[in-house]
Amino acid sequence: MIKKRFIALFIAGILLAQFCSAGSKPYRITVSELRDKIAAEWIGQMIGNIYGLPHEGKYIGAPGPEAWPYGYTKNMDKLKKYDGAFSDDDTDVEYMYLLQMMKFGAEPSYTQLCDAWMYHIRDRVWLANRAALGLMHFGYTPPFTGSRELNPHWYQIDPQLINEIWAVTAPGMVNYAASKSDWAARITSDEWGVEPTVFYGAMYSAAYFEKDINNLIEIGINALPVNGRFTSTAREMIALHAKHPDDWKAARKEMAQKYYTDEPDMTKTIWNANLNGACAILAMLYGEGNFQRTLDLSCAMGFDADNQAATVAGLMGVILGMKGLPANLYLPVDGWKMPFNDTYINITRYDLPDAKISDIIDQTLNATLALAIAKGGKLSGKPGKEVLSVNPEAVFNPPVEFCLGPLPQMEIGKAVDYNFYTEANKSYNWSIIAGTLPDGLAFTKGKLTGTPVKTGYSKITLQLDNGKEKTTRDFNLLVRGVNIAPAADTIFANVRQLNEKVLDSCWYTFGKPMYAKNVEVINDGIISGPGSVFYSLAAKAKIPKVDYYGYGWKTPQKISMIALHTGCLEEFGGWFTSLNVQYMNEAGKWAPVEKISINPALPATDIVFYQPHFAEFVISFSTVETRAIRIIGDAKIQDHWNKYTKNVSGFTSITELSVYH
């Protein structure tokens, strides 16, 4: 066994060098074979998704039974109902991405993809995807929509199941596919949450020219950060397979113990990216290149089973081509002559067209050819016998665009060190072409530094270019006064303690350490991480509720601005539907402030998919002199599908409430 493992590692090292080293010769593939593999990838994903759906979230404490093949079970009725394949989140976002490639070219920008998200995705979206969508509607773009500081689901499985398209269209361009997969994964996720997506991206790209699953796993690992969490996890899965070569259940048990049972509470979910990536590796290793066995194992490994089933089945399709897919899985209904009756029915996304699967395949082929040629490849040969030469040294350069997230929270007299750039646009040229910076600040290569000395707004226009393309954008920078909230003598709130029993009875999806037990955290200066988020969750009764938060001081204060920093939100609520400011007048009564403005405005709709996690709302008003001030508004009561979450009173989520002179 050790000798075989050494040989496999040695071969994989050679393969990776062939794919990725400088001076590599082009890879060649006939267009007919390329189309066949693309077809098998799409058909494979559809098989895996529909096959795996009945097993989603079903096997947690123990794996699925070895009563194989599982078959389509209850989804046979849906296949017959739609007379073809039907969409789900393992294929629909990729189809949406493909349409953006057809519209904008092989490398659509973050902005273009966000526009597609906000138009087409209006329900049936969860976890990191839902959080990213809410942040998009708030005005942010990736990678901020997936950042750890703003998207509390950054570590979940989401990017693994929606980004295979970037590698499918980059055959043999492993570095390109891995980098582009990383870039796209950051729409919804961050840090080690994106690593399995990068792993799959490298494998998918390499699978056009490499059939051995062990070698492909090594290529995937070598595309990861050397010290990455999933890098270590993948190596451990290989070791578990070697330890239990004939007992997948034993390997699964050890894997689940470490990466689910013993996972830190903040990231312990059945949708954890690292956990589900580990499940997929075990399924591939024990599947030994057999499509049906790998598919059943992907389901039996459990947790978010349908997602790894779809991704792994798509990969197997690239490896094996259409001849390697069992015909009974793509022709399960009597009378069908073409895979899934050549029909893909959209049941999940707004205004996403139904399609012939053959058209989806041809569109993907066209995008692949266009990208390969743009990146140094070449198409040659007579019609019907064309051959594509691929440049394995192709590099992904992110589009030239601004990445929009929170602007610097600047206070007079406090040092500023803020980056306008992200890793996606850091290497481009940055310059100010109009406007004036706040006094005391300087701008160099996308970085804002210094110490502001005067309050107020300053408008500037920045330019970003790569020597060929350029773009500009206006920014309105705010320097605030001194935050007097930490010096308050009293905290006002209608709910002061989190009702943990009510929370525990609900469908909540964040790690329990996230939640603060009392309201006193709202002026501690901490806006994310364990214990930072307070929920005004009280009795379990579905009644209208008004929430308020504020402060009192022993001496009068002149106040003209409050900043509300919300926390993470649940599917069943957590946000204000209205927001006002009141101060305590000389008679000791709460009175409304005048000329109030909220920037940005509260979301125009109460729909859950429009609500941003960890957002700041700056509320300005005519100056008042008072010993007490508060924000007050209606807490959303959100219906929810989970029976244990019904009849929960409205509540709001808050991390910080700042107050300024």
Image (spheres, rainbow, N blue to C red):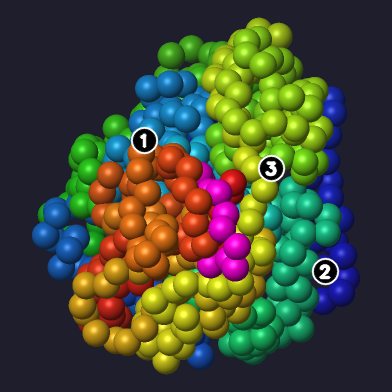
The residue nearer to you, when weighing 3 against 137, is 137
What's the magenta region? 552-563
Q: What residue is drawn where x is 79% and y is 35%?
A: 451
Circle 2 is placed at which residue position? 4
* Cβ–Cβ under 8 Å for marks 1 and 2: no
Q: Position of residue 231 (x, y in %)?
A: 75, 61
Q: Is residue 560 shown in magenta?
A: yes
Side of 562 relative to 118 (left or right) = right
- N-terminal of the pair, mark 1 or mark 3, is 1
What kind of element bears circle 3? strand
Q: Label 3 sits on what residue type?
A: Glu
What kind of element bears circle 1? helix
What kind of element bears circle 2? helix
Q: Quadrant of residue 213?
A: bottom right
Side of 540 relative to 507 (left or right) = left
Q: Position of residue 547 (x, y in %)?
A: 35, 69
For marks 1 and 2, give the CA distance.
47 Å
- Neighbour class for label 2 at 10 Å: few (<14), some, many (≥20)? few
On residue 116, the disc is: 1
